[in-house]
Image: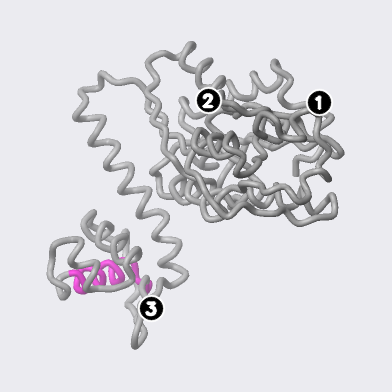
Amino acid sequence: MKLPESTGSPRVELRQLRYFVTLAEELHFGRAAAREHIVQSALSQQIQRLERALAVPLIARHARHLALTEAGSRFLIEARQILAHVERAATVAQSGGDNGPVLRIGVLDEGYEAVRPVLHELLARYPDTEVHLVHAGVPEQCRCLADGRLDVGVGRASAVPAEIATELFRLDPLGLLVPDGHRLARLAAVPVSMLAGERLLLPDERQAPEFARFLTDLCRSSGFVPNRYRGSAQGLRPAADLVARGSCAMVVPESAVPVADVRWRPLVQPTPRYPWSLLWRAHDTPRHVGALVATARRMGRREGWVTADVGLAS
């Protein structure tokens, strides 16, 4: 589609941004129009006006499907951030300015346990900070950081995009969670090779692929493929219940050891440590985000969470 060149600053309306984001998520004019409660022709006209204002095609219209152009993919990130900032500004205005800074943090159960002491210290120093925890793995965290729905993420930063800044704050020893009476519960430490044949409850690869990959690589480094337990559990407590019943064993970081009828034994040979990092937008570091990063950095050094002898933490 050939579009005329724009002259001066493009005039873009907020509703056009909202319509574009909805269409980008649905990639179907009918479904997007239904979500926005407008007729399909009106949605199509607004998208066309947006493209003319920008002088660049955002949507590739094929015979049987729609797709974002390269420009559309880039524009989607910015459009989501603009809409998120507008929503945040409205919330601040409606609150009358009485609230303190807000931190929206994406984290799964294990990551929360790792970062919990950091949050406690931050809140002790800045008690007016309002913390909202959002259950999300690293892939979803990166998407939400990019479009402004999150301020900070917590997880392994091995494959995050370049626009996400990271700060390693904790190398967390990994250990095996087994029920009382298990043959490995008698050991002070468990060599990784002894996990071969154990039914292991592994993380959901769709939600926490970086953790699942870390554990799989750990097992393969000792010459075996992990024997995956076919069941599943959402959250540490339900998972620990499965372990306590003898259904499976589970590898968890030391910081996330639950209180239950189970035993945690550190893994050795090699001694793996899971790398927890904070994630945030590299081009956008508000003061409260910077305060969290500084607190994590300070605690990591003070508590000895990050040392020169890192073991397996790639």
Q: CA distance from mark 1 to mark 3?
A: 60 Å
Q: Residue at x 27, y 67 (%)?
A: 50
Q: Is residue 173 visible?
A: yes
Residue 144 locus on image (x, y percent): 43, 47
The nearer-to-camera label among 2 and 1 is: 1
The residue positioned farthest toward the front in the image shown: 181
Q: Which residues are magenta?
A: 43-57
Q: Which residue is mark 3?
A: 60
Q: Is residue 1 visible?
A: no
Marks 1,3: beta carbons within 8 A:
no
Q: CA distance from mark 2 to mark 3?
A: 41 Å
Q: Is residue 87 above or below residue 256?
A: below
First in residue order: circle 1 vs circle 3: 3
- Disc 2 crowd rating (10 Å Cα; few below 14, some 14-19, many 20+) is many
Marks 2,1: beta carbons within 8 A:
no
Q: Which residue is mark 2?
A: 292
Q: Amino acid at mark 2?
A: Leu
First in residue order: circle 2 vs circle 3: 3
Residue 282 locus on image (x, y percent): 55, 42
First in residue order: circle 2 vs circle 1: 1
Label drawn at residue 218: none
Q: Amino acid at mark 3?
A: Ala
Which residue is at the front of the view, 68 or 229? 229
- Which quadrant of the rendered structure holds the N terminus? bottom left
The nearer-to-camera label among 2 and 3 is: 2
Q: Which residue is mark 1?
A: 188
Q: Residue at x 80, y 55 (%)?
A: 224
Q: Residue at x 83, y 29 (%)?
A: 308
